């Protein structure tokens, strides 16, 4: 079930739902003299529920519940593993707090998300040339683009 479908089912017809891709679009919609215009829902690409996602020499095997760095296992909790898979999966974008909470935690608990990010950062810190989780203030989190491997 998609995030939009989960939100709609939780609201169960109690309130309208407005979907915006970023804060600029939201500001434009709210400041419009005629009010929000009908918008088509923004579909945010989410990586497959199963499969292998890679970032340089880091690999997250979602189906096998395994993370490896340069072939060596990296012990992560299921929540940390899912968060990492989303952050490194295509496309490499800034993920909003809300998107990550819904996709990884199944809700909107930003305190739990911040705690998970903190633990993930601590685990990734020990990886030489490994990925780093960056905060985009007021928006969410992102990773740097993956390093090129042998001219690829």
Image (tube, rainbow, N blue to C red):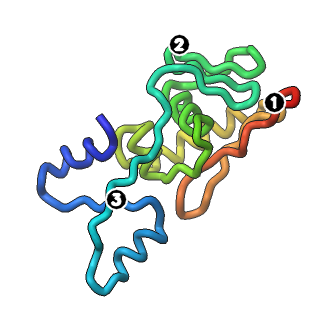
Label 1 and label 2: CA atoms lie apart by: 26 Å
Q: Earlier in the sequence, mark 3 or mark 2?
A: 3
Q: Is residue 27 left or right of residue 137?
A: left
- Asked whether 95 or 118 is in front, the reply is 95
Instruction: State the residue at coordinates (53%, 60%).
Output: 139
Could you tell me which quadrant the N terminus lies in? Answer: top left
Q: Is residue 47 above or below residue 108?
A: above
Q: Which residue is mark 2?
A: 64
Label 3 and label 2: CA atoms lie apart by: 34 Å
- Asked whether 120 or 92 is in front, the reply is 92
Q: Tag on residue 152?
A: 1
Disc 1 and disc 2 in contact, CB within 8 angstroms? no
Q: Quadrant of residue 16?
A: bottom left
Which residue is outermost to the left? Answer: 13
* x and y percentages locating residue 134 in the rendered image: 66, 50
Instruction: State the residue at coordinates (59%, 48%).
Output: 93
- Asked whether 70 or 92 is in front, the reply is 92
Instruction: State the residue at coordinates (47%, 28%).
Output: 48
User: Mark 1: which secondary structure?
Assistant: loop
Q: Tag on residue 19?
A: 3
Q: Is residue 32 above or below residue 64?
A: below
Q: Is residue 89 left or right of residue 96?
A: right
Mark 3 vs mark 2: give the one in front.
3
Q: Earlier in the sequence, mark 1 or mark 2?
A: 2
Can residue 100 be seen by looking at this rendering? Answer: yes
User: Mark 2: which secondary structure?
Assistant: loop
Label 1 crowding class (10 Å Cα cut-off): few <14, some 14-19, many 20+? few
* x and y percentages locating residue 92 in the rendered image: 62, 43
Q: Is residue 39 above or below residue 4?
A: below
Instruction: State the residue at coordinates (44%, 26%).
Output: 49
């Amino acid at each position: 079930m998609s995030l939009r479908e989960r939100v709609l089912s939780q609201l169960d017809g109690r309130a309208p739902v407005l979907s915006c891709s970023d804060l600029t679009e939201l500001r434009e919609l709210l400041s419009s003299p005629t009010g929000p215009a009908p918008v088509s829902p923004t579909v945010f690409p989410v990586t497959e529920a199963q499969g292998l996602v890679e970032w340089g020499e880091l690999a997250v095997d979602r189906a096998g519940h395994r993370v490896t760095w340069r072939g060596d296992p990296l012990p992560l909790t299921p929540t940390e593993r899912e968060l990492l898979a989303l952050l490194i999966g295509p496309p490499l974008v800034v993920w909003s707090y809300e998107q990550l909470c819904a996709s990884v935690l199944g809700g909107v608990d930003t305190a739990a998300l911040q705690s998970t990010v903190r633990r993930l950062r601590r685990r990734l810190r020990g990886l030489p040339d490994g990925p780093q989780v960056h905060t985009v203030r007021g928006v969410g989190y992102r990773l740097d683009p993956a390093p090129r491997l042998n001219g690829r």
